[in-house]
Amino acid sequence: MNANYGYQLYQAERIMNRAEVLSADAQRGRRVAAVTRGGRRLARNSRASAAMAVNAIIAVAVRTPARAGQARPGEAARRVAPASPPGR
């Protein structure tokens, strides 16, 4: 329990007039708008970073020669049927 507990109870139970209610609503709206803007900025930055990372991975994969039995990105894997023994 903190030292201002009695005052906090008084503030919580006190009836607010119309101007205080409108002021509190406006303040909450400004806070939500600020949080939303920050979230959008983070999402936009993370999408850009992810796209750059994917493009870099593809560029490296295209420049690297494929190992035996592996297809390069964007190419279909070539399946070679095993040779059947003669007479079958």
Image: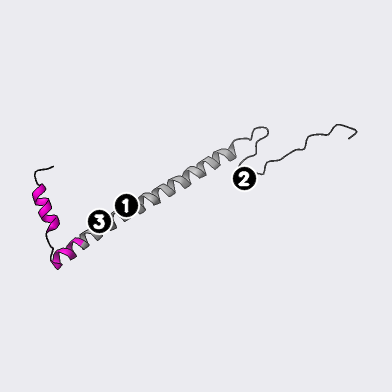
- Which residue corresponds to mark 2? 74
Rendered location of residue 9, percent (x, y): 12, 52
Residue toward you, 49 or 43: 43
Q: Amino acid at mark 3?
A: Arg
Identify whether 42 is placed above or below 85: below
Give the secondary structure at mark 2.
loop
5 left or right of 67?
left
CA–CA distance in space, label 1 to label 2: 36 Å
- Which residue corresponds to mark 1? 38
Q: Kindly indicate the quadrant of the structure image that contains residue 12.
A: bottom left
Residue at position x 43%, y 48% in the image: 48
Q: Kindly indicate the quadrant of the structure image that contains residue 27.
A: bottom left
Residue at position x 32%, y 52% in the image: 38
Residue toward you, 62 or 16: 16
Query: Along the polypeptide, which appears first: circle 3 or circle 2?
Result: 3
Q: Amino acid at mark 1?
A: Gly
Q: Amino acid at mark 2?
A: Gly
Q: Which mark is residue 64?
A: none
Q: Residues within 10 Å of mark 3 (few under 14, many from 20)?
A: few
1 left or right of 52?
left
